[in-house]
Image (cartoon, grey):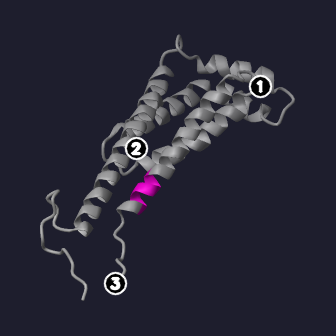
């Protein structure tokens, strides 16, 4: 006959090994969630700063960058879209500033249900920046790749957290 320790106290104060295992899993999940929140907040602060920076031409002049990009993209497939953006540089700057600042604000929130959407929607924006600016400002590419990589990493981390938090059927 098998004897179990169910209902009897262990030296560490837990009732049984199943309870201790659940407590360990909960602690690991909380730690992973805290790491994800810290990383998300760092990226959110960077996006917020970049969005606010677009409001100050001394920090970053979108019309100036688009003029450089138009010169570099002449004769290439991106010339048309670069020309259009250059003709509407102030409007483009406003849209990008609002998008980046909004994404940053969402990522800074503790329990944001919009975080996945904010992370995912920054990816096409970053890809567009790289496509249009890569010839004129090649230094933009590694920066935007880093931002995009961080967004993808956080999306995957959040997915893992949701999966680990989901209830599992116990084997009987």
Residue 129 appears left or right of 23: right
For the C terminus, the image quarter is: bottom left
Does residue 66 belong to the magenta stretch? no
Mark 1 residue element: loop
- The residue at which mark 3 appears reads as 172
* Residue underneath mark 2: 36
Nearer-the-camera pick, 137 or 85: 137
Residue 16 locus on image (x, y percent): 20, 68
Residue 133, position in %: x, y? 70, 27
Q: Position of residue 170 (x, y in %)?
A: 34, 77
78 lies above or below 29: above
Magenta segment, principal secondary structure? helix
Q: Is residue 160 magenta?
A: yes
Query: Distance of mark 3 from mark 1, alpha carbons?
Result: 61 Å
- Near mark 3 (Cα within 10 A), the count class, few <14, some 14-19 or many ≥20, is few
The first of marks 3 and 1 along the sequence is 1
Pick whichever, 170 or 167, lies toward us.
170
- Labels 3 and 2: the sequence-earlier one: 2
Looking at the rendered image, the quarter that the N terminus falls into is bottom left
Please tell me how crowded label 2 is: few (under 14), some (14-19), or many (20+) other residues with Cα within 10 Å: some
Q: State the extent of the magenta-drawn residues as a range.
A: 158-163
Residue at image mark 1: 135
Q: CA distance from mark 3 to mark 2?
A: 33 Å
Instruction: Tell me where residue 37 sits by quadrant.
Output: top left
Q: Is residue 49 left or right of residue 92?
A: left
Number of the front mark, 3 or 2: 3
Q: Are marks 3 and 2 in contact (CB under 8 Å)?
A: no
């Amino acid at each position: 006959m098998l004897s179990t320790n169910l209902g009897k106290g262990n030296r560490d104060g837990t009732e049984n090994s199943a309870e201790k295992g659940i407590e360990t899993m909960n602690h690991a999940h909380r730690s992973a969630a805290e790491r994800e929140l810290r990383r998300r907040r760092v990226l959110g602060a960077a996006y917020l700063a970049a969005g606010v920076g677009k409001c100050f031409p001394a920090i970053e002049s979108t019309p100036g960058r688009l003029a450089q990009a138009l010169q570099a993209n002449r004769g290439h497939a991106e010339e048309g879209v670069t020309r259009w953006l250059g003709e509407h540089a102030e409007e483009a700057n406003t849209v990008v500033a609002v998008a980046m600042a909004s994404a940053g604000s969402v990522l800074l929130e503790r329990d944001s249900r919009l975080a996945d959407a904010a992370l995912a929607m920054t990816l096409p924006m970053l890809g567009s920046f790289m496509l249009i600016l890569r010839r004129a400002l090649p230094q933009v590419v590694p920066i935007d790749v880093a931002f995009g990589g961080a967004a993808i990493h956080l999306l995957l981390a959040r997915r893992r957290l949701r999966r680990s938090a989901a209830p599992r059927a116990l084997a009987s």
